[in-house]
Every structure is written in structure tokens, then in C-alpha cells.
Amino acid sequence: MKKSSLNAVFSTASMRRRYEVWFIRLGLADDGGAWWFRYLLMNLGRAARGGCPNYPGAENELPVQIWAHWFPRGAEPAGTIGGSVADGLLLSRRRASPFHFKMGDEYWSGEITEDSCSGRIVGPWKHKVSWDLRYRSTFGTTLSDKGWIGFSRTPHSDAIFSGEITFNGQTWRGDPLGYGMQGHNCGFRHRHDWTWTHCIALSADGGSPTSFEALEYEMPLGLRFRKAVLWHCGKEYAFPKMEPLRRNRRDMQWAFRCENRKENTSLVAVIDGSGVSAHQLAYLKTDCSGSFAVANNSFASATLEFNRPGHPSEQIHTDGGAVLEMVGDPG
């Protein structure tokens, strides 16, 4: 699939049970923290108004939502959600490129395209936030694609961001403003358990950033999906084999070894999502039967030890340049 089509819409207005989300994870260039923005469609064709209408009053029960979360260094995360019914939704055609999503009212609005996003959530909520960003990258990938069941795509894996963000009166502005990724996920339902990370590390010589992404989730018959992808020095290294070393949701720790025997490459990843930046979010199930907890730290640390033929072992480290997300068994 071409990089330009990784954002293409899958959902239709008649789908009664499906989530689709476009999201941004952005670590500020001044290392002061990270931002996470989420543009969500949920059950557009369910009942008369979509979403999960049997959860009235829940901030995430509406069919069109925009989330904004701030992860300051050394302090607890803070966030807010805006949403409404889908009457005013402007969305590109299914499977069409270029992609666009636009929605909003007097209290909240949001727009995301192939290379930009903006939004505003101003009340009557506790936090006031607005953003206007552009991003560029050299690499995009698909981690998992199970057709109608769901997919996990990353149109911008080594993204460089410019623009501005304002939160409760404080403004960050720059070019570059920060570094991170833009992802696109979709599914009939959420997985019962998954672990996902994305890391970005800047090059010491000013070259393009290194990015690394890994995903693990449950499959039928007791099977597990596992895949990791490294983008380093302008080359993609895929790892179809992953060996778990440690996973602890309570402490937000994930370590594993991955390898590609055909290319004789290997990588050991240690992701540390502990600390004050770790928090819990409630996601509604697509069948509207309840919610489940998602542990997320979008200001995590990561250390990668990468080995490839003809090169000495390389250690790639980022303090705050990673996101770690965990769902399921805390052990």
C-alpha cells in the first residue's frame, strides 16, 4: 500500500459497529513534554445518532470525538475530549486519497489531513486547548492488516512537526516544534489485550530521525500477533519474530528481543513507561456493552540495542521520546 493511502477512510455511515481513529503523538523539541491528539469515529450507523447511545452523558459515547492530552515532564497528564453527533462531519470518500476529516461546533472543532491537523476544545470543560500543526516524514508502514477485522497503520513514522499548541493560556510554537508519529487504526472491535510502542530518536549528526514501532495482540486459538519495524539511517528493518522478555502493565514495563533471520539482524528493546506520566483511559467497547481500561504513557523512555551485519552494535536511546500503551492482563 502506498504511503499516501495509509490514511484512507475505511468506515461508512452505515457501519453499526466499528471504530476508526487517526492520532498524533508529538514530543516537544524542548523536551518539556508530549502531546497526544486523537480523531475518532465510533459506530456511525448505530441507532439514530451513532456512538454508544446507551451511555448518555459519558464523554466518549458520541460517534465523532476529538481527544487532546498533555504529558508534561515531571507532572501528571491532563486532557479533555470534545464530541458530537455526525451531522456536520466532513469526511473524504472511503478508500480515497488524499484524506480529510473535519468536524466541530462553537465549543470544539478538529481537522486532520494527510500532512496537517488542527483543533480547538474550549468549553465548558476544565482545560482549554487549541493546536495548528503540520508534519512531514520520510517513512510510513503497516504493522497489521486483517482486512475487515481491522488494521494498524503508520502513515508518518518519523514525523517532524511545526506549528503551535496552546493549553490553558500557555503556548508552544516552533519549526520544528517536535518529533513523533501519526497513526491510523480501525477495527470491528478492540483487541482484548495488546501492547504497543512507538519510539523516535534524533540523529547526532542532524540526519533524519530513527523510529521504531512494535505491536503485539491476541488472536484466535491462543495465537499471538507480533511484529516490529525499525527505520534507521534511511532504511527499513522488519522483524517478524519477537521473543517476550518482560511485560508488566502495573509498572508499565515492556522488554523483548526481535530478529530477522533472513537479514541476520536483531534488536533488543526495553521500554519504560513508569512514572508520573503513566495514566489510565476508559475506552468504550464497540458493542456498547461496557468500557475497558487502557494504560498509556506518551512520555516514556526507550533503549534499543540494534545489531546488523557489517556494523558494530548500536545503542539508540530516548528519554521521553516514546509512547507505551497496554491493555489486558497486568502481569
Image (cartoon, helix red, strand yellow):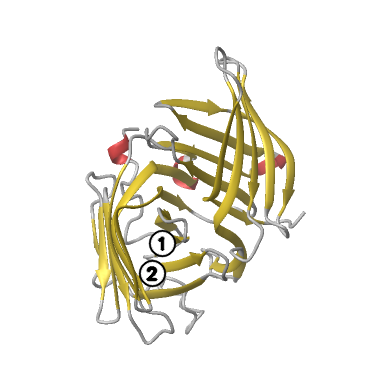
Residue shown at the point (47%, 61%) measured from the top left: 32
Taking the view exactly as shown, the residue that stands out farthest to the top is: 310
Residue shown at the point (48%, 41%) measured from the top left: 201
Residue shown at the point (40%, 62%) measured from the top left: 37
**Displayed quadrant of residue 217:** top right
The circle drawn on residue 196 is: none
Front one among 80 and 2: 80
The picture places residue 293, in percent across and down from the top left corner, at 62, 66
Front one among 180 and 319: 319
Q: Is 70 situated above or below 314?
A: below
Mark 2, other Cα within 10 Å: few <14 / some 14–19 / many ≥20 = many
Looking at the rendered structure, the kind of residue marked 2 is Gln
Classify the position of the N terminus by image quarter.
top left
The picture places residue 298, in percent across and down from the top left corner, at 52, 57
Query: Dots 1 and 2: beta carbons under 8 Å?
Result: yes
Task: Give the structural element (helix, strand or loop) at label 2.
Answer: strand
Mark 1, other Cα within 10 Å: few <14 / some 14–19 / many ≥20 = many
Q: Is 175 situated above or below 49?
A: above
Disc 1/disc 2 C-alpha distance (Å): 8 Å
Which residue is label 2 attached to?
Answer: 65
**Displayed quadrant of residue 6:** top left
Which residue is label 1 attached to?
Answer: 38
The picture places residue 127, in percent across and down from the top left corner, at 42, 80
Residue shown at the point (31%, 33%) measured from the top left: 2
The picture places residue 200, in percent across and down from the top left corner, at 48, 43
